[in-house]
Image (cartoon, rainbow, N blue to C red):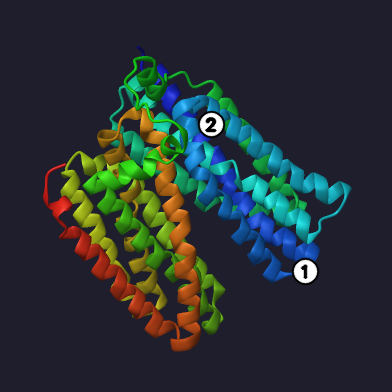
Amino acid sequence: MTLARPLALVALLQAANFCSGLGNAMVTIAIPWLVMERLGSATLAGVVLALASLPPLLIAPVSGWMVDHVGRRFVSVGADILSALSVLAIPLVALLHGLTPTTVMLLAVIGALFDPAGYTARKALLTDTARATGMGQERLNGIHEGVFGVAWIAGPALGAWLIAGFGSVSPFWGAAALFLVSAGCIALLRVGDLGIEARARGAADAVGGWPSVLRGFVVLWQDRLLRTMTVALVVIATIYLPTESIVLTAYFEELGEPAGLGTVVSAMAAGATLGAFGYGWLSARLSQPTLLRLTLAGTAFSILPMALLPPLPWLTAAAFFLGFCWGPLNPLVTTLIQKRVPPDQHGRVYSAQMSLFYAAPPLGMVLAGAAVERWGVADTYLALGAALTVTALAVCLSRPLRTRF
């Protein structure tokens, strides 16, 4: 095999990963803008975004089952095409019939139905691509998460630029084109399918019906290390995400410095992206237990100075370090699943994790919002920072992380 072919295969997967992430990020900023511009309601914009978060929670297990049983490439291509059509429906309805609160909610919910399937299928394709190219699995996982992070950094900026230059419906046209490019890239990706191959050999699980659909949750629960990591990450995300979306927003809103909020959030995102790209390099030099403990401890200790709300330069530096420590966690957990779970169950395990990650953080945001109103930003941030630190350190000392894996 020449060097050109492995590079081309990696480039196709990562182009699809980038285009899909960029399209979703553009839509995330375009929907609330369109609602507030056309319907004049910030409350409705919040409701629409909240409703759009429900389909991934409910549909993810079914998406994972489809990835494992129907095929990774087929599901990825189909999901991107359906995402393109659902995104196109928004500007078409706006142009032909006008938007109403009901149509906006319905179109947003329909559009969110297909994201879990595409995301899960592309993640499952990592093992196939690593096998076909000979690239180290850890290195490819880090590249995948880093590219996805870059897409989510660039997406809101590109969406805002399109709105400013061409109107509020223009990001939807752009996102639809990106989804179609993503579908085309995966259609050209010829790397095999380890899950389908396991089924052809009779090496796959024989469970059927709803137990098969929910198999990912069972696998996560039965594996002590994956169970510990999944619970820990869900708890940490439930604590951490409100600090970014609620607490810091309230803090900078009180100061009247929206630019400061953008600086801190961008620093966190940049750090997370750099940390994800660096995962392959770090994993080659540190054992997985050591790397896992370092990332968790770094995340815990970097949030404490942030919770003290120091001057902006120090807050930005701590935010970057927090993001950098968090960045390797996603590719690390992906690697653990790839090594500990049979390939015919990867889709269901990834989707089970996605369901849990979608379910818990909204509750944390509600509680954080109530806490800020009652006790203020400073006390709420300190409490959340302390809770995250205790959780991360408890996981570092847990028995599954004290054993070799």
Amino acid identity at mark 1: Gly
Quadrant (top left, top right, bottom left, bottom right) of the C terminus: top left
Position in image of residue 104 (x %, y %): 74, 55
Label for residue 40? Answer: 1
Q: Residue at x 38, y 20 (%)?
A: 199
Label for residue 76? Answer: 2
Q: Is residue 36 left or right of residue 139?
A: right
| Secondary structure of the residue carrying numbered label 2 | helix
| Residue farthest to the bottom, as pictured | 375
Residue 282's image quarter? top left
| Residue 278 seen in the current view | no
Q: Is residue 172 left or right of residue 367?
A: right
Q: Mark 1 packing: few (<14 Cα in 10 Å), some, or many (20+)?
A: few
Position in image of residue 394 (x %, y %): 20, 64
Q: Using the image, determine if residue 255 lies above or below residue 283.
A: below
Q: Is residue 199 left or right of residue 292?
A: right
Q: Residue at x 25, y 53 (%)?
A: 228
Q: Residue at x 50, y 44 (%)?
A: 60
- Distance from the alpha carbon under mark 1 to that under mark 2: 36 Å
